[in-house]
Amino acid sequence: MASGLLFVDSVVGHTSGPLVTLGLVAAAGTGVAFAARGKLAAVKTPLVPEAGLSLRNVFEILAGFMLWLGDTAMGKENRRYLPFCTALFFFVFTANLIGLVPGFVMPTDQLQINLGIGLVVFALYNYWGVKEIGFKAYFKHLCGPVWWLAPLLLIVELIGHFVRPITLGLRLFGNMLGDHVVLGVFTDLTKGTALFFVPVAFYILGTVVCFVQAFVFTLLTMIYIRLAVAHGDDH
């Protein structure tokens, strides 16, 4: 009993810092979203871009990128799921990126946090699939087109579905943890030397890794959504 309590305490203590950082990321993202919404709502000529680099221009560029990605991965008919995917991308990207800031803990190098995000994706795409095509048709997708292979295909499909949140979490965890460790090692090795450009280069590489991992996480989520809501002719 005592050993179990010590284990729980160590896990909670180990994740409390990343959870606080994750809360800050969510709060900051919500604040920026409301600010951008107010900015866009106040525009009198939405077709005319602002001069220079402004909050509106940045969000319009990012919105265009996410619209292109959503149409490519999910199809234009599934744009109603794009707000969630866009929020997911910025949430994961910001959670990745904040770990590069000194004094902040990277939430996405914690496996349990990534698994939690993966479970949210898992729950939502299954819910949307059942809502879109009905439970009977969704279950029929899992059983496959051949009735006598249905029991085997159902087991394979169920395993594949339940593995998805685990693979999403593990992929993000492994890449972000590796990037964090490499950056820390090279920063410590060059501390107090004239090789200051080495950690700078790895910070740039780390930023690219943060973006790519958020992109991959969101792209896989979009693919799962499209497969879940696809009707019989499109599946």
Image (tube, rainbow, N blue to C red):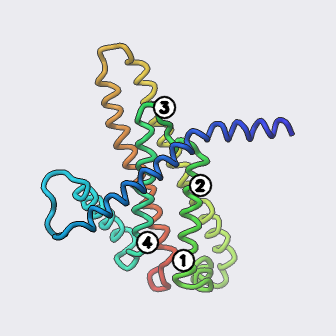
Question: What is the secondary structure assignment of the residue under circle 2?
Answer: helix
CA distance for labels 2 and 1: 20 Å
Identify the disc placed on residue 81: 4
Residue at (57% x, 74% y) in the render: 127
The amino acid type, in three-letter code, at marker 3 is Val
Residue at (44% x, 36% y) in the render: 179
Residue for badge 3: 181
| Disc nearer the start of the sequence (2/4) | 4
Can you say whether 78 is above or below 97 in the image?
Answer: below
CA distance for labels 2 and 4: 20 Å
Q: Quadrant of residue 135?
A: bottom right
Can you say whether 200 is above or below 41 in the image?
Answer: above
CA distance for labels 1 and 3: 39 Å
Identify the disc placed on residue 210: none
Q: Of circles 1 and 4, which is in front?
A: 4
| Disc nearer the start of the sequence (1/4) | 4
Q: Position of residue 206 (x, y in %)?
A: 38, 38
CA distance for labels 1 and 4: 11 Å
Of residues 160 and 146, the one nearer the viewer is 160
CA distance for labels 3 and 2: 22 Å
Question: What is the secondary structure assignment of the residue under circle 3?
Answer: helix
| Disc nearer the start of the sequence (2/1) | 2
Alpha-carbon neighbours of circle 4 within 10 Å: few (<14), some, or many (≥20)? some
Q: Which quadrant of the rendered structure holds the N terminus?
A: top right
Residue for badge 1: 129
The amino acid type, in three-letter code, at marker 2 is Gly
Q: Position of residue 151 (x, y in %)?
A: 69, 77
Residue for badge 2: 116
Of residues 41 and 205, the one nearer the viewer is 41
Q: Position of residue 102 (x, y in %)?
A: 42, 31
The amino acid type, in three-letter code, at marker 4 is Tyr
